[in-house]
Image: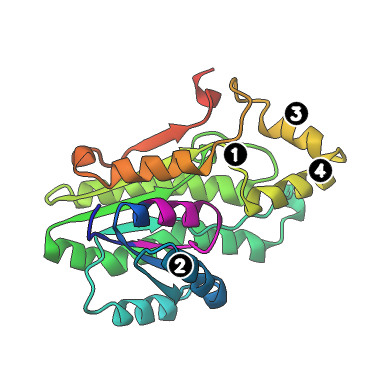
Amino acid sequence: MKNKTVLITGAASGIGFSIAQLLAKQQANVIITDVSEQAAQQAKERLILQGFAAQAFKLDVTHENDIERLIEALSNTSVDILINNAGIQHVSRLEDFPMGAWQKIIDVLLTGPARTCKAILPKMREQGFGRIINIGSIHGLVASPFKSAYVAAKHGLIGFSKVIALETADCNITINTICPAYVKTPLVEKQIADQAKEHGISEDEVIEKIMLAPMPKKAFIDMDEIAATVQFLASENARNMTGQALVLDGGWTVK
């Protein structure tokens, strides 16, 4: 990982920042992007204070102009590893689901990675190396009620990755998707509150009876598990692993 340049979307907090920290410790040059410029800059400063190399940029993956500005700013930089992590969520039964929120989820979770890949792939081809890692979800493989847009987007992300794996099989570029079950992030904390309201139960009941119920191990996935999986996928040891969905689900899908 030494001297590799890593670009992470949605990296100001949660899973994205956990990945940034681990790869920075491995002496990667980390580029933190986030929809909030202030949050991205604060995350960058946290890494710099720890003695790591980092840059920060505002990036809304739903805006073509943001991506174009970022690519221009990085015109003299070769991005070796792209991590598509930006995410949002909205929990509602379809009849009550605002279509604006439905489309936004698709734009961030599915079209966003397509935009970033399209922008960065040409340079990866030029340099003869690239690793693309998508942070997917167990909901790319299974469904849960009240998450129609999220489940649709995460299923689509796995299909998208398979296509790009075929299109890049002629060079040293790989693309894979990590599919964790629930991770205790700010996004999931909000889901807990939203589902408690939707189901008319307590937040503890949401955790016990909905989120962890399908998992034989009955545990949230830790962010460091995801970061370590990213590290492996970015390594030379994973050079022939491409188009795959790696599942971290506490046994959810083995039943």
Earlier-in-chain disc, 2 versus 3? 2
Residue 37 makes an appearance in the image: yes
The boundaries of the magenta stretch are 7-22
Left or right: 191 as drawn, with respect to 72: right
Residue that mark 1 sits on: 182
Residue that mark 4 sits on: 196
Give the image location of residue 63, x and y in percent: 47, 75
Q: In the image, is residue 106 part of the stretch drawn in magenta?
A: no
* Proximity of marks 4 and 2: CB atoms separated by less than 8 Å: no
**Within 10 angstroms of label 1, few (less than 14), some, or many (20 or more) residues?**
many
Residue drawn at x 58%, y 64% is 104
Identify the element where label 3 is drawn.
helix
* Proximity of marks 1 and 2: CB atoms separated by less than 8 Å: no
Residue that mark 2 sits on: 49
Earlier-in-chain disc, 3 versus 4? 4
Kind of residue at disc 4: Ala
Q: Which mark is residue 208?
A: none
Residue that mark 3 sits on: 209
Identify the element where label 4 is drawn.
helix
